[in-house]
Amino acid sequence: MTTTIGLEIHVQLATRTKMFCGCSTTFGDEPNTHVCPVCLGLPGALPTLNAEAVHLAITLAMALGCEVHEVSEFSRKNYFYPDLPKSYQITQFDRPIATVGSVPIVTERGARSIRLTRAHIEEDAGKSMHVADITLGGETLVDFNRCGMPLIEIVTEPDMQSGDEAYEFLRNLRRLVRWLGVSSGDMEKGAMRCDVNVSVSPDPALRGTKVEIKNLNSFRSVKRAIDYEEQRQAQCLGGGTSIVSETRHFDEVQGTTTVMRSKEASNDYRYFPEPDLPLLQLDSTELESLRAQMPELPWEMQSRFERDLGLSPYDAALLTEERSTAEFFQQTIALYNNPKKAASYMGTEVARLLNERGKTLSETQLTPAALAGLLTMVENNTISNTASKDVLPLLVDTGVTPAEAVKNLGLEQVSDASAIKDYACEVIAENATQVEQFKSGKEAVLGFLVGQLMKKSKGKANPKLAGEVLRTLLKS
Amino acid sequence: MSSKLPHTLEQYRHAVHAHELSAEEYLDETRQCIEHGDPQVRAFLHLRLDAARSDAQATNPLSPLAGAPIAIKDNIMVAGERCTCGSQILEHYVAPYSATAVVSLLAAGAVIPGKTNCDEFAMGSSTENSAFFPTHNPADLTRVPGGSSGGSAAAVAAGFALGAIGSDTGGSVRQPAAFCGVVGFKPTYGLVSRYGLVAFGSSLDCIGPITRTVRDAAIMMNIMAVHDPKDATSVKRPHVDFEATLQPTLTGKRVGIIRELQRLDVQPEIAAAMEAARKAAVRSGASIVDVSLPHILSALPVYYIIAPAECSANLGRFDGVRYGLHVDGRNMTETYSRTRNAGFGTEVKRRILIGAFVLSAGYYDAYYKKATSVRQLITDELEQALQSADVLLTPTTPTTAFRIGAVTDPLEMYKADVFTIPADLAGVPAISFPAGKDAAGLPIGLQLMGPRWSDADVLSSANVIFTALGGES
Ligand SMILES: [Zn+2]
């Protein structure tokens, strides 16, 4: 059985105001507080295009490698629903702002590119809330705060073959939208939504019947729904039942899909060009300047980190998950020229502290200069690696310089051979058994003796030097 | 109204600026006139005469309109006033904001005596499609005032207001102006903001003035022709003073006569008025040119595809969910259907159905798409004709005002717009001005059209012919 998967993703553009009016896009406020005649579709009101939304849409489309069209057109998509106050949605149909494009993904099957069909701008509908409580005014209430929010809809080619691939595609797309600042990518807040088309066919050369799945509220749901649907369709086909072209609803609790409506009963949306908005004409010089401002993309940076800096795939992925982290890392290695060490330190010690504090890097006091300074001190043996773990929390929480922190904590590493010799003599005197073992050839005991020395020095002794001094004394 | 009182906006403005008349005094006269005449004419759906009087008291006498009463068609928003669009579905709807054109008029010192009757959602040519009552033509109360802005035209003709605004989608300002014997101007699409005008055919709708003289239309255009960032189809243009650019003659102007329209059947007195206007134009220094627009007669069918298509989407919002009439059903679909069935009149339903049909899958290409390409063809032909002529002269209507109830076939009614529709399809400015009367004493209107953005020129040329035919300058 061959599975074919295509996605339709709605990404909410991170503008300050809605797509066609001046209302705020703030999420989570009292229902119907961010509304006006335009987004409520009151008689006589007219839409005006939000230039910021267009700007963000172009930025994302360019990053997706799309062809961005200098002329595109808005259309009306007509249907009746209580959360659609004009009875039509302003969207793009015949002439979208962008076509083609691709997103790279890496799964167990290796690196691939998922092709995109198109990307277009549209407005969101309001939110229907079904309430059982009759005292709240009946069965259905509508919040129009979301109505008119700017969206970009991205449609993929049917290029994915498993739930894992779809999951990976979405993860990478979310990383990109956050990276570019075009969206929060937050699926829980509805800033990213996804419909899935799945078809299963016994013949790899033939495409099966397409089934659409809706109500997918997380990346995990997308994967679960696809996995379930793959099985269900394969079972149907195996049992001689044919697949019906229909829209199915994913049940989060059961992990199953159920029929919502058949495709035959689907709406005729009677699309036609939106007469209230002129053709969207983009200035070619403006497009060029947007292209010039395009930052290095996360997947480009990730492979550069592996290729040019020799980072492990794990570290490269971790550091390019967020643009601020990647920038922090780049600034750090500009001051401390050991990318692999910096990467692993960020991936372990720094990550652990952030995790404990429940903060992101930018929410702490840590600066690239401080981290580079700390790593340099370890490198120069000014402090031990162990001692650095005591210094880091100060840098993270208070913003003092590494030098100040080391001084405050009294952690300068002792690299003075005579001081270390005193500790070494004491250790030899107090651990006769281990000294005997060493002398009889059990060299591994040296580690224990170094540990004892470090304890005496309260961790300040240079461990490498301590080992050398002990060995010399023991061998003499 | 006593004869010493100003008859035009221009005279009124002069009298108030010269302190010979106060806005309150004039409004009191207007009130008497309305209270005496409107029970017969029925131009207004809602009056606000007490509020208008306090507004008049508060106006600056030196403002451009200085408290002049201007009536507003009831499909244009005036904050705090009802806006019914002549429809049951919005019978109790109160506008939460004012249309941009209304804001401009109020800022210029206009006072609003009331909202005028119209065909439901501006769909009609007689104001008989108002859900509330028909308006009567002040020239003959047994006749229609035309439509859809029939209330506005009747109000100006009857002396209930010095000017009015209406909306023109297929001739709805010009045709009633012709029937009532007043001036109606449809500006270039994009010159006056549509914000706050309840949409019928969005790519066609224009707000325009209805006045007693061409000069008064120019005065109102000076106030309403402002770029509006709230309307994406409003166009930023260099400032033009439409009144100051009125010229005394037509020297050097070429007046075009459209060959294909000459062949249409028109009432003999209207043909005679055309001839008189032609001669007056020549006397005023114009030359007459013959122009051909091979596809102009397709304008009517094209219009009756495009306007219904747009209206089918525009009127979808009246679903009883958020405002307006609501009739409960057993489920959502039935509630929609019952609400809309009870709220809309026959003509509106007919156009919504036509519109939904021409946009539906499988018919879109044959109807809507075809209509838009023929629309472009007509626009191109008109543009080309307007290279060999500066303005085009046509009758505004094939007949003078017909009797109330006389036209029952919708196709016959649609034909009343045959001369006015081309200007809407092409988005060009067009004006109807009074040009005499027929044997029954009913007003005749003639129309001038010009290229896009030649509004000042169209007003100026119309003013010359209008005054040459005996109109007030
Ligand atoms: Zn809004």
Image (cartoon, grey):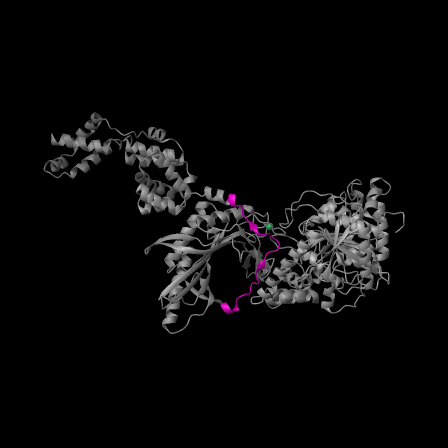
Quarter of the figure with the N terminus of chain A: bottom left
Confirm whether the magenta stretch covers residue B368: no
Is A412 above or below relative to B297?
above
Residue A193 percent location from the top left of the image: 47, 55
| Left or right: A429, with B293 as reference point | left
Residue B22 percent location from the top left of the image: 84, 43
Q: Which residues are magenta?
A: A263-286
Picture quadrant of residue B344: bottom right
Camera-side residue: A195 or A437?
A195
Camera-side residue: B54 or A408?
B54
| Left or right: B271, with A116 as reference point | right
Camera-side residue: B225 or B321?
B225
| Left or right: B365, with A359 as reference point | right
Residue B155 percent location from the top left of the image: 80, 55
Residue at the far right: name it: B3
- For the point 73% across and 60% down, the residue is B259
Q: Is residue B169 visible?
A: no
Residue B232 percent location from the top left of the image: 62, 49
